[in-house]
Image (tube, rainbow, N blue to C red):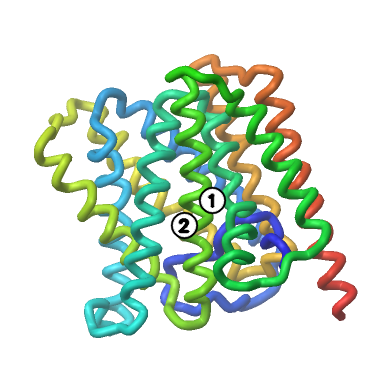
Amino acid sequence: MTIGAGGQSREGISPGRGRVQADHCGRAIVMMVLSGLSFALVAVMVRLAGEIPLCEKVFFRSVIMLAVTGALAVRARENLFARNPRMPLLLLRGAFGTIAMFLYFFAIERLNIADATVLNKLSPFFVTMFAVLFLREKLSRYIIPVLVVALVGAALVIKPQFDFEAIPAIAGFVSAAASGAAYTVVRHLRGKEPPYRIVFYFSLVSVVVAVPPMLLNFVRPEGLQWVYLLGIGVFATTGQFALTLAYHQAPATRISIYVYVHILFAFAFGLLLWGEIPDTLSIVGTVLIISAAVYNYRRVLAEKAAAG
């Protein structure tokens, strides 16, 4: 088994099944960059929303996506609540995704945005491990050193220590594991469920989980906080649409490495808005993680070429 080249789930929100409609690599790269920018802006909105409780941020991120995917289902004349033998898997994907979102937002609030983003980008490596363990996929020999390099990089970003200061970094790391579990379920559902239905149930589970604590401890947003909260949902939806359009324009093996532009945008926003500069260990760790991903990407391309 190989890690998907570039390492991000191709789960999208269009009613289609994710076919490459035409090979327009230039347009696809533009869409990938737009997706990275949008997801980086989600992190910025989470931070700018300030003391608004985490559950409210998750709610606004999810309810807008829920509305969009629900509208797509109506357009496709599909009943999303019809009996479905794969419903437990759809809900499981939603549960893992919700855990990942809460932990990622928690990390964003307390870490440098670049560090939180880098840790979240470990999810493809977890997909590899989970797919081998639970989906019985074969493990390519070169993947083991790739995983080791990525985990060493993660350790440098986290800088393990026996005190509470390590909790946000650990949360970011566990968010990547939860995302990896969610994407593993998506991999299992590939070809069996349309992407928009998978995203709909992810958003639905997130809303259901976020609403009770939000109602118990609701903090009324003031002024620009409304803009920031809506921005979380709008930019998350824009990022997902752009990602989906990119994979419809060109094969994943040619463009998926561009998901890592997200890290560059996160670094730029952290530096410009809050003067955040990752320390030396974080920079070295980031380089190791991206290098592992690039190496894997090149191996995937080579294997595809060899297979004809």
Which of the 4 image quarters holds residue 92?
Answer: bottom left
Residue at x-position 22% and y-position 78%: 81
Quickly name the residue at label 1: 35
Q: Residue 7: x, y in percent? A: 64, 55
Left or right of 308: which side holds 168?
A: left
Residue at x-position 56% and y-position 33%: 266
**Label 1 CA crowd tier, 10 Å (few <14, some 14–19, many 20+):** many
Tell whether label 1 touches label 2 (CB within 8 Å): yes
**Label 2 CA crowd tier, 10 Å (few <14, some 14–19, many 20+):** many
Q: Which mark is residue 301?
A: none
User: 187 or 170, which lies in front?
Assistant: 170
Residue 49 is at least partly visible in this image: yes
Q: Residue 128: x, y in percent? A: 64, 59
Which of the 4 image quarters holds residue 219?
Answer: top left
Disc with the residue nearer the chain's start (2 vs 1)? 1
Quickly name the residue at label 2: 240
Residue 230 versus residue 82 in the image, above or below:
above
Residue type beneath disc 2: Gln
